[in-house]
Image: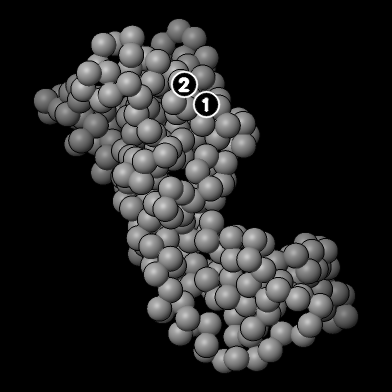
């Protein structure tokens, strides 16, 4: 009997180091952040947090900058996610062909994923500069009479957030392509052969066969890319600093600004709690879909 009980304990002993590390680095800080969202904890961080109840949430409700960041994050979500759901699938179909040296093409498309986001952000900021590659290309193409001498990619309130979106899409294409590629290679070739006999060939076979069979992967990519787009920070920090006039400021960047620039830790934790609830809802949506699909 004792030996049986010991065997039941062994799995937990293996889990204990990882759970301890997660508890110290994730769960305990998360609980502290939840507590601080109900306090005033700012400026002089040597003082103890002051309990203020739901005052931070009421402040959040009437904060125009916060709602501006919510709108920007929603625009980011709507602009990035559909592209990152559809374009990588087309790319995966392209590199799933049995061609010579196809592995090199797969590696080339995946390369942006392994490039540091800091390096990518700086490089794209140079490309978007007033005398950068894109504006020089505009002049060389003779289209400057339409768009002017240069396009203010990162300094225009109407263009800044969309210019940053391009970097997110460029970085994510290869990653989601790899997910789709795994799904495509699990589809038996006999299915396409049977479809070809029924007259479904060429591009049509992908609408008839590929897309329906790839539905779980499509939903997975939609949820993952939605969470990533909601948490976008590095691109904004490196390229625009949330400007101009808060036009590219996202929720996570606003949280960072409040916590580490203005030292309003309690208010920043409140913003973080709202962000957590939204991401948690997206994760639950994915879980429900996965359970329904498996059943």
Query: Residue at left 44%, top 67%?
Result: 66
Query: As displayed, is residue 120 above or below residue 1?
Result: above
Picture disc at residue 196: none
From where the camera sits, is residue 183 visible? Answer: no
285 vs 41, left or right, is: left
Q: What distance separates the C-alpha of mark 2 from that of mark 1?
A: 6 Å
Picture disc at residue 132: 2
Query: Residue at left 42%, top 53%?
Result: 245
Q: Earlier in the sequence, mark 2 or mark 1?
A: 1
Q: Regarding mark 2 in the picture, which secondary structure is present there?
A: loop
Crowd rating for badge 1 (residues with CA inside 10 Å; few <14, some 14–19, many 20+): some
Query: Residue at left 75%, top 76%?
Result: 44
The picture places residue 156, in percent across and down from the top left corner, at: 36, 41
Q: Residue furthest left?
A: 199
Q: Regarding mark 1 in the picture, which secondary structure is present there?
A: helix
Quarter placement of the C terminus: bottom left
Q: Quadrant of residue 213?
A: top left
110 vs 289, left or right, is: right
178 vs 263, left or right, is: left
Crowd rating for badge 2 (residues with CA inside 10 Å; few <14, some 14–19, many 20+): some
Query: As displayed, is residue 77 above or below residue 251?
Result: above
Query: Residue at left 45%, top 7%?
Result: 100
| C-beta proximity under 8 Å, tags 2 and 1 | yes
Q: Quadrant of residue 80?
A: top left
Tag 1 residue: 126
């Amino acid at each position: 009997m004792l030996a049986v009980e010991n065997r039941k304990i062994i799995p937990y002993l293996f889990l204990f180091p990882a759970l301890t590390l997660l508890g110290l680095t994730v769960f305990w800080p998360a609980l502290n952040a939840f507590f601080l969202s109900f306090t005033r904890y700012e400026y002089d961080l040597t003082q103890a947090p002051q309990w203020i109840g739901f005052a931070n949430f009421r402040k959040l409700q009437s904060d125009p900058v916060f709602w501006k960041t919510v709108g920007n994050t929603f625009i980011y979500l709507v602009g990035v996610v559909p592209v990152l759901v559809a374009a990588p699938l087309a790319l995966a179909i392209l590199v799933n062909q049995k061609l010579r040296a196809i592995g090199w093409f797969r590696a080339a498309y995946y390369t942006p994923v392994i490039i540091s986001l800091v390096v990518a952000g700086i490089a794209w900021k140079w490309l978007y500069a007033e005398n950068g590659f894109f504006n020089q290309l505009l002049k060389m193409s003779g289209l400057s009479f339409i768009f002017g001498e240069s396009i203010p990619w990162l300094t225009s309130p109407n263009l800044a957030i969309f210019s940053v979106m391009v970097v997110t899409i460029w970085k994510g294409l290869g990653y989601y392509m790899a997910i789709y590629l795994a799904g495509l290679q699990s589809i038996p070739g006999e299915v396409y052969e049977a479809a070809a006999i029924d007259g479904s060939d060429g591009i049509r076979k992908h609408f008839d066969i590929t897309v329906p069979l790839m539905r779980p992967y499509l939903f997975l990519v939609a949820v993952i890319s939605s969470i990533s787009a909601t948490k976008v920070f590095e691109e904004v920090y490196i390229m625009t600093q949330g400007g101009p006039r808060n036009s590219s400021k996202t929720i996570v960047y606003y949280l960072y600004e409040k916590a580490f620039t203005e030292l309003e830790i309690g208010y920043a934790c409140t913003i973080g709690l709202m962000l957590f609830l939204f991401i948690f809802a997206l994760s639950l949506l994915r879980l429900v879909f996965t359970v329904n699909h498996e059943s």
